[in-house]
Amino acid sequence: TRLRLKELKGKPSVTKDGISVLLFGNIASPKDTQKVLNFGGTGVGLFRTEFLFMGRSDSPSEEEQFQAYSEALKSMAPHPVIIRTLDAGGDKDVPYIKGLVGEEANPFLGLRAIRICMEYREIFMTQLRALARASAFGNLKIMLPMVTSLWEIRTARAMLAEAVLSVKDAGHKVAENIDLGIMIEVPAAAASAHVLAKEVDFFSVGTNDLVQYTLAVDRQNPRLLQWYEPFHPAVIALLENTARAAHEANIELGMCGEMAGDPLALPLLVALGFHELSMSAPRIPWIQDYLMRLTKDRCLELFQKVRSMDSGSSIREELTRFMEEHQ
Ligand code: PEP
Ligand code: MG
């Protein structure tokens, strides 16, 4: 198999009948881009920027952030890099942000991610300025985490415009266009995807949190594994609603949660018309190998069957059978 996976590198990631699905890698630092390229990834679908904010007692400066973002963009160019703005809180412990926010009874339902950026605007503005400057060095797309409502997108867009103007004033180059998208990782966003789709350039589904919040199951609690079911009919319904909204608004549809790298899920994601899947780099060749055996018709047929099934376990069995038929 190893040889076969090597052979895949450089081959287009398409289904047997020619439907393209871009396969991207998730990264946590600019150094990780090499690994994405080595495994044949043609972009970064999620750059988790939290690492820059960890192990320190204050925010990283604009300059420090600019260095990290532009390094990632340069090493991936001309491929796109989706950089996610700060997603602190919940499972992502950034001690000095925690110090600002204080104790909360329910941190996963608390002041986290985009909410911190709305409350502490100077932290967000510094990051946006660094991103605006970095945009001159590659193909940058900016992604907001944990969005639930339109006003967050509008505020972020206005602040990005302000950041762009002010760094230009200071004499820096900025890309002509910077796409702004959101993660779909809260059930509210998936259910109101038609509202949000009108004001963003792309969606990327974060299944790790989407599954957690939809099923009310802590993603980190090992005792809840049998309840943490990405193929639960409720999750499938939210994915379908999100996909429909993205297609109706004609925006890019991606996924960057663990489900994107799970071969069992792949035919469903092809059926739903996902344009891009971003995963841990070593998974890319495995997903590509399976993708090349699929046809859209068979995937659509499978999806029709799956959407009327009544449990995660029966859906899982069906998906396993489908994969065996495509070996
Ligand atoms: C997700 O929630 O699915 C996701 C990709 O983001 P993170 O795992 O960083 O929360
Ligand atoms: Mg998340």
Image (cartoon, helix red, strand yellow):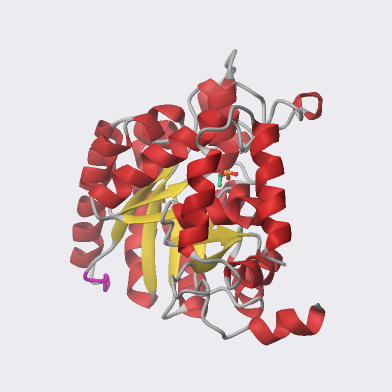
Whether residue 49 sits left or right of residue 120 in the image: it is right
- The spot of residue 29 in percent (x, y) is 60, 62
Quarter-of-image position of residue 284: bottom right
Specify the quadrant that holds the N terminus.
bottom right
- The spot of residue 126 in percent (x, y) is 38, 50
Q: Nearer the viewer, residue 276 or 173?
A: 276
Q: Nearer the viewer, residue 185 or 293?
A: 293
Is the residue 215 above or below the residue 294 in the image?
above
Q: Can residue 296 be seen here?
A: yes
Is 175 a magenta residue?
A: yes
Q: Can residue 148 be seen here?
A: no
- The spot of residue 122 in percent (x, y) is 36, 41
Residue depicted at x 60% and y 41%: 57
- The spot of residue 252 in percent (x, y) is 34, 57
Specify the quadrant that holds the C terminus.
bottom right
Quarter-of-image position of residue 41: bottom right
Which range is magenta?
172-176
Whether residue 140 sits left or right of residue 3 in the image: it is left
User: Ligand 1 is located in which of the four quadrants?
Assistant: top right
Q: Nearer the viewer, residue 304 or 119?
A: 304
Q: Main secondary structure of the magenta part?
A: loop
